[in-house]
Image: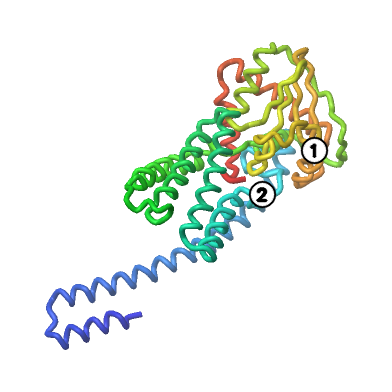
Amino acid sequence: MRLLPSICGGLAANSGGTDLLGLARKGLDKIVSMWYTLIRIKYTRMVRSQIVNVETVVSAATAKGWLREQGHTSQEFSAMYSMRKLKPDRSMIGMIPALVVLLAFGVTAAFFGLRAGFYVMAALVFVIALYVLVTFAKTRNRGYLISGLFVLSQGLFDVTFPGSFGSDGYRLHYLFLFCELFFGVWLVYLAINKRLKWRGREILELAAAPIEETGNGYTSRPLPTGKTEFSRREILALAEFAARNLIAVSYVQADRVVFVPVMSGKELGYMLGLRPHPDKETWVSIGFDGSVSVSISKDDYLTYREDLSFDQLCKSLGNLFIEFLELVKRGEGIRIVDRMDALSLSAFS
């Protein structure tokens, strides 16, 4: 690793080297030394983190037994140790649109030239921008507005990029590049803070948090879970809040509102109207007469690590939305978002 400093020393000797090259040699020695130190620290932390993970699992298992003996609930334990009841989400479906655009651009450019590649990429980007803006119109989520402006700026940049559409004399691409970068930074901020995340996984985690009993099998029939005394206006206010914060897609019917929690990556069908009937999905129905009923899809039920008591899970999900109604009624809807953020789930799951 001291080969490079030696070469520098040799060059200095052959050319009547000055103190400057001597200082450069010492500085290079320090850089190499720091590089080795950083690598050693990195791998030391990796080993220590593995040890800590093992110790955490053991201590968590011991603590869970102790908490049960003391009469504490599993919800309190889950809050302490962030125990997940859902299986990990390894889906990459959210990356598909970007990969399709890049693949289409690469293939078209390779066979038909760069200009044709820009044609195809711009067309696909404008389609995505249209979809994102339609989603904003349906949810009123500001994150989707920023996302739509970002994608639209990218499409306009592709159109005005020199050589793409014969627009060599234009300089508008600088403006659109600035807009793309501006909205891109804003978009990253929103994504990190989970303002672009559909909250279906959080809903299922919160519903399962108080459930301890297992062994009660799945059933496809909806279950009545309780009664409420909220007005039609208050139920519709929750529907608006749920859409704006990407908690659930709402279907307003003559006698009720049906809330369908949506996981990130699965919102496309709902936004394009491809799922007009939520019968086979997980949903919570709140009637204007106060009746509450719940249905959990088999696919969502199988995302849990254990076979949780189905009746209790449905009741918990219904009670969760009744709590949401109360919070929105009091003007404390932000508490709902805070509870979901506190679960610390991935921003992309």
Residue drawn at x 78%, y 12% as measured from the top left: 289
Where residue 219 sits: x, y (%)? 87, 36
Residue drawn at x 61%, y 40% as measured from the top left: 80
Where residue 82 sits: x, y (%)? 63, 43
Image quadrant in which the C terminus is located: top right
Where residue 16 sits: x, y (%)? 12, 85
Residue 76 visible at all = no
Amino acid tagged 2: Asp
Residue 115 visible at all = yes
Q: Nearer the viewer, residue 34 or 117?
A: 117
Q: Is residue 279 above or below residue 326?
A: below
Where residue 7 sits: x, y (%)? 26, 84
Q: Is residue 56 left or right of residue 277?
A: left
Secondary structure of residue under mark 2: loop
Q: How is the image coloured?
A: rainbow
Q: Is residue 178 above or below residue 163?
A: above
Q: Quadrant of residue 182?
A: top left
Secondary structure of residue under mark 1: loop
Residue drawn at x 60%, y 24% as measured from the top left: 241
Image quadrant in which the N terminus is located: bottom left
Q: Is residue 211 above or below residue 1?
A: above
Label 1 sits on residue: 297
Q: Nearer the viewer, residue 203 or 237?
A: 237
Residue drawn at x 53%, y 53% as measured from the top left: 120
User: Which disc is residue 34 wearing?
Assistant: none
Amino acid tagged 1: Ser
The numbered mark, 2 or 1, whose residue comes first in the sequence reads 2
Q: Crowding near pointer 1: few (<14 within 10 Å), some, many (20+)?
A: some
User: Which disc is residue 89 wearing?
Assistant: 2
- C-alpha gap between disc 2 and disc 1: 17 Å
